[in-house]
Each structure stands twice: as C-alpha cells, then as structure tokens.
Amino acid sequence: MDGSNGAPDASLMLSPRAAVRALLVITAYALASGCSVIDGSTDETLAPIGSAPGSTTEVTDTSTDPTIEVASTFAETVAPTTTIPSATVGPFPTQVPAGKCTPQAIRADFGTAPEAWLECAGAWAVTRIQSCPPDVECEGVDVFRWTNDGWRHRGMTYSLCVLMVDETGMPRSVNDRLLGGNTDCVEPITYTNESSSGPLQVGSRGDRTRRLQRRLVEWTLLNDSVDGYFGANTRNAVFDVQHLAGLQPTGVVDEPTARALGLPWP
C-alpha cells in the first residue's frame, strides 16, 4: 500500500474474475511440476531440508520394520567379541578323545577293564574296577583322568563325600554330574589375607591367589570365577595339576607347583 491516506492503489488490484484466473494458472503449473500445495507440516511427500529437488523421504517405523531387525542382528553378529581361552592353551588335555571312553581303552592303559558301568565327562571317567580293599572306606568307585599318556588311575574313592573325591583332582562340576556331588561332609571355609611369600592353600585370599586362578582358567583346569578366594574348586584344580606334573598331590601351592604352572615364586 502507498499514499498518504492509506488507501490501496487501484492500479495493483485485480478484478475478481482476473484473480480467479490467476489462481487457476498457478495451481495448474504446480500440478504439472509435481509440487504439492498441501501444508508442508502434514505432507509426507515433501523432501527434508537440504535434499535434492524432487526427492522424497520415506518415513519408516523402525519398531515394526523387519529389515531394521535384520540389520541390527547382522551388526551384532559382526561386532568384535572377547577372545575366550582355547581348551588347548595349557599343556594338559581337558577332554577325552573320541573313542577313548571305553573299557578297552582303560584296559590298554591300566591293565584291567571295568567290571560294570563306565561314565565319562570332560577328561574324567568313573567306573568300578575292583572291590574295596579291607583297609579302605569306599564304594568301589575308581576315578580315571585322561592325560597326555592316556588313562591314569587316580585311585578309589568314597563317592558319598566330595572331600575324598576332591583329592583325585576331579572338578566338583564333574563330580556332580558323574557321582551326584553329595556335600554332606563339606565344612565352611574361613578366608584370611595371603602372605606375600610362602604357600597358597584353602582359605588364602589375595592377588597371588587371583593370579593362580587366572592361570588355571587359561588352561581350562578351573571352571570358576577369578575372585582371589582359594576355595574347594581352586584346590581341586591344584590337586589335578600336581598329579599331572608328577608332584606330591597336596592341594597346596608351593614353589614346585607354581613352577609347573609357569608362575613366578613367591
């Protein structure tokens, strides 16, 4: 608008007929160009700011679109994973080879075949070779361990008390599977801080015990947490290492046992 009195300039005004004609021309041009005259706040065919002219954006509900799910699954599949120590990292076998859980294999290595049943789990076997000697309390349960030299007899045991089975080095998880894992004779353990030198044994607690456990886990001889508490599971693994290394099986980590594990002493 212009002029001192604020009245509209008649030269800029269109007659009603001309205004309608102009609106029709603009609409026809817009339709021919593929543009939309709908309010952009609700038109899903409008391209977002910065997109190429004439392009469109497809709005997808990611909560229900199966292609998004597949993409997510693939991303999880190819994501880096933590390396898990192999069962062959340590020098001692942790699994009975195929075809070796047989009476014939035990006879070949031990000289006597089982009288009745034979059960295997991991690197272990339980069976009955002979009746209990008069001076031994047992139920005729023989424990065998598969080693680099074949089957080795770990002795006869009283299967109703896991403490006697523990001395063979058999993990309690295997004992639970093969013998039932009776724990009626188990006593609670009191833990104290370990010394900076000297042996490690049941009840020790600290960084040296944690380092011991880490090595046992790396060699897959211990299936337990690395928490720095020397409990029954750690002791069983130590018994096993001492048997395998030809050491006196005591369940106590002394210098020869540490050396067999490749650990510094003290």
Image: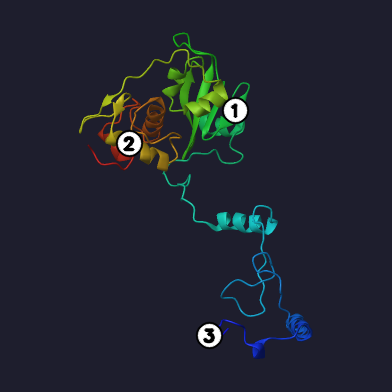
- Camera-side residue of 117 and 184: 184
**Mark 1–mark 2 contact, CB under 8 Å?**
no
- Residue named by callout 1: 119
Q: Is residue 19 above or below residue 186?
A: below
Question: Which of label 1 and label 2 is nearer to you?
Answer: 2
The residue under the point 56% across, 32% down is 121
Q: Indicate left or right for 11 with 222 as reference.
A: right
Q: Is residue 82 above or below residue 104?
A: below
Return the residue found at the far bottom.
Answer: 11
- Residue named by callout 3: 4
Q: Is residue 112 visible?
A: no
- Camera-side residue of 11 and 26: 11
User: Amino acid under label 1?
Assistant: Glu
Q: Is residue 32 above or below residue 139?
A: below
Asked where in the image residue 130 lies, by quadrant, the reply is top right
The dot on residue 184 is none
Q: Secondary structure at mark 3?
A: loop
- Camera-side residue of 183 and 115: 183
Q: Position of residue 210 (x, y in %)?
A: 33, 36
